[in-house]
Image: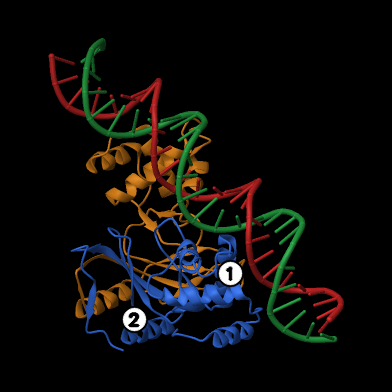
Chain colours: A blue, B orange, C red, D green
Amino acid sequence: MQHLTRDEIRQSLTECGLKATQQRIVVLEAVTELHGSHPTAEDVFQRLRPANPTISLGTVYKTLDTFTETGMLRRVVSEGGSKRYDSNTMTHSHIYCSKTKEIVDFEDKELEQLLIRFFSERQVENFEIKGFSIQLTGCKVEPDKKINITKVSK
Amino acid sequence: MQHLTRDEIRQSLTECGLKATQQRIVVLEAVTELHGSHPTAEDVFQRLRPANPTISLGTVYKTLDTFTETGMLRRVVSEGGSKRYDSNTMTHSHIYCSKTKEIVDFEDKELEQLLIRFFSERQVENFEIKGFSIQLTGCKVEPDKKINITKVSK
DNA sequence: TCCTAGTTAAGAATCATTCTTATCTCAGTA
DNA sequence: TACTGAGATAAGAATGATTCTTAACTAGGA
């Protein structure tokens, strides 16, 4: 999800059958701006508070929930104590460092194809697959440096 | 993990460098008995309470934590509000139903091989992979019936 | 412009988890 | 077997995250 104008945001809210309120607009804006960092409700709240001092944390919680239900956001599974959200609703995977609690995104078309092929062979009865994601767990070697994946196929 | 005698449990605790206390024994017993249902601390507590009325919930939390650190259990990433534990520490995947909040285990050697091969080609720099798991998300078609996967390779 | 269903702010309530501290117990040693 | 110290536990307070409640507000259609 790239930079959207307020009108574009307004429009995508309406398309999802939601009233385009000021609060929803700024929450969606904040989450997309925080893209990649998998923010918690609290993170989003802190982000938009300066410009919107009257919004309440409860509203942020409820709004993020609403967005998840309509599929505009997805919830990231995490081992930590609080829920995290992701504005990237495409199939992608996560690398989770148990040392720094970081979650790094990682997209790989080849992996996606591999899994689609795999699961179409297996048959999962009584279950409609909406999506999948791979979680790599482990530890950063040097906690201060970034994690890098080479040979990613796009 | 199968049915273990108390002495076997006692032994595996000692092997992990933990004092074999009564509480740890019954917690481990309860988690393995609840195998497959990915219990929360509360679930485990309820399970062992009747036979151990003096154990405290705090102890259950702490003990599950300790077991996770030593690798005797693993924490299951879940979208819900509370932490879940799994006595199956082998690489395996989960199917998550967003309707019923159920988590179903699913083991497939072929899938495991596929992913091991894939990640050995990609190089993840500055990250030591300890494990991975695949999460399928979606919805049960008939909430009362079970989910079945056919053609699983063992 | 008016009306109403849906939304929001504020804070109370709830739920999950961690922390604190005094007491207790396991397991090694005399 | 009894003693001892490190580590573990019970109980409940404290914290943190999330949901609930309710009265006031607002977007958007008539």
Mark 2: amino acid: Glu
Q: Which residue is mark 1?
A: A63
Do dots 1 and 2 share one subunit?
yes
Residue D28 vertical placement versus B131 (above, below): below
Q: Chain of mark 1?
A: A
**Residue B42 place in picture, x, y as percent:** 50, 46
Q: Is residue A145 visible?
A: yes
Q: Under tag 1, what secondary structure?
A: helix
Q: How many marks can you see?
A: 2
Tell me what residue is drawn at x 43 percent, y 55 percent: A81
Question: Foreground residue, A116 or A105?
Answer: A105
Q: Quadrant of residue C19?
A: top left
**Residue B57 place in picture, x, y as percent:** 47, 39
Q: Is residue A57 left or right of residue A18?
A: left
Q: Chain of mark 2?
A: A
Residue B146 vertical placement versus B26 (above, below): below
Q: Is residue B141 left or right of residue D24?
A: left
Question: Foreground residue, A115 or B110?
Answer: A115
Q: Is residue B28 visible?
A: no
Which callout, 1 or 2, points at the residue further toward the start of the chain? 1
Q: Is residue A17 left or right of residue B2?
A: right
Q: Under tag 2, what secondary structure?
A: loop
Question: Foreground residue, B58 or C9?
Answer: C9
Mark 1: amino acid: Thr
Query: Mark 2: few, some, or many residues within 10 Å (few <14, many ≥20)?
Result: some
Tell me what residue is drawn at x 24 percent, y 76 percent: B119
**Residue D29 place in picture, x, y as percent:** 78, 86
Residue A107 numbered mark, or none: 2
**Residue B91 place in picture, x, y as percent:** 32, 64
Residue A58 vertical placement versus A121 (above, below): above
